[in-house]
Amino acid sequence: MTPVGSLLFVGNATVLLRLGGFTVLTDPNFLHRGEYAYLGKGLVSRRRHAPALGVEDLPPLDAVVLSHLHGDHFDRRAARGLPRTVPIVSTPAAARRLDRKGFREASGLSPWTEWETSRGDEVLRVTSVPGQHGPALFHRLLPPVMGSIVDLERNGERAYRLYVTGDTLCRPWLGEITERFPGIDAMLVHLGGTRVLGVLVTMDAEQGADLASLIGAPVIHPIHFDDYTVMKSPLSAFVDETSRRGIAGVRTLERGRTVPLSPAVSDAR
């Protein structure tokens, strides 16, 4: 298949996507190694690895897709360095806070609603899908979170479909995503087994493998796995768990390396 774009892994949940003529950034986190991300409620976590790019190295962006407003997903360097005119697609709660910070193009999406932009015969569409950032009671104490379906269309035909999980735990009702959005070409899985006050709030290896099996995407890119001290489940555990279960398609990413994105399925387009 001819590539439709590329993916550059910056670090943590930050990925620079080029889809057709569009450039999209996910979860902008540009803190330096050793700096602390603020997680709310007085909680902080130290960054272990430097990002592959600084905010000053970014190309012009068509959109930022932000799963939620936590300091390891949208930090003070991003707040200072991103253009105030860049469209940011996130939750309604995050969009309201970003608007107060001067990001007037922030759009808040409820689950299953969409944002889109076009250029020539190409359309970029982002649809919010549900997520649950921790057990039910703990989830309510954290910022609202969303996953995203990112679609590229050309001449009215879908050319590529990417699922970005966001910081969610695996829940059976996430299977509705594949019912509404068949033919996912690849998924970016937020892992890390993040624990806050001992409570699991992002997928560990087992939950990540559960979601990979539930979604059934032919290409699985794990991200968000070891950049912060609150992350307790290493990437190797996910690779081992998916291998043990016979889940194919796991492709790990190196910070700073660009990989091509190609359609992996042709049905239901």
Image (spheres, rainbow, N blue to C red):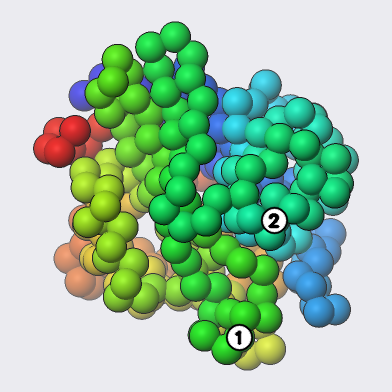
Tell me residue 3's x, y (percent).
32, 23
What residue is drawn where x is 36% and y is 76%? 171
Query: Between marks 1 and 2, how big is the CA–CA gap?
Result: 18 Å
Res. 93 visible in picture? yes
* Residue situated in front as seen by the camera: 187 or 268: 268
At x 63% / y 90%, what residue is drawn?
Answer: 198
Q: Residue 61 appears at what percent x and percent y? A: 64, 26
Residue drawn at 76 percent across, 70 percent down:
39
Query: What label sits on residue 94 in the rendered view?
Result: 2
Which numbered disc, 1 or 2, marks the residue that appears first in the sequence?
Answer: 2
Residue at 71% x, 35% y is: 105
The amino acid type of the residue labelled 2 equals Ala
How busy is the neighbourhood of tag 2: few (under 14 within 10 Å), some, or many (20 plus)?
many
Q: Secondary structure at mark 2?
A: helix
Labelled disc at residue 138: 1
The quadrant of the rendering that contains the N terminus is top left
Task: From this view, report whether residue 99 is shown above or below residue 243.
Answer: above
Q: Which quadrant holds residue 9?
A: top right
Q: Quadrant of residue 175?
A: bottom left
Please give left or right for residue 147 compared with residue 255 in the image.
Answer: left
- Give the percent coordinates (x, y) of residue 66: 61, 49
Query: Is 164 situated left or right of 248 in this image?
Result: right
Q: Where residue 179 sits in the image (x, y, percent)?
A: 22, 56
Residue 85 lies left or right of residue 11; in this view the side is: right
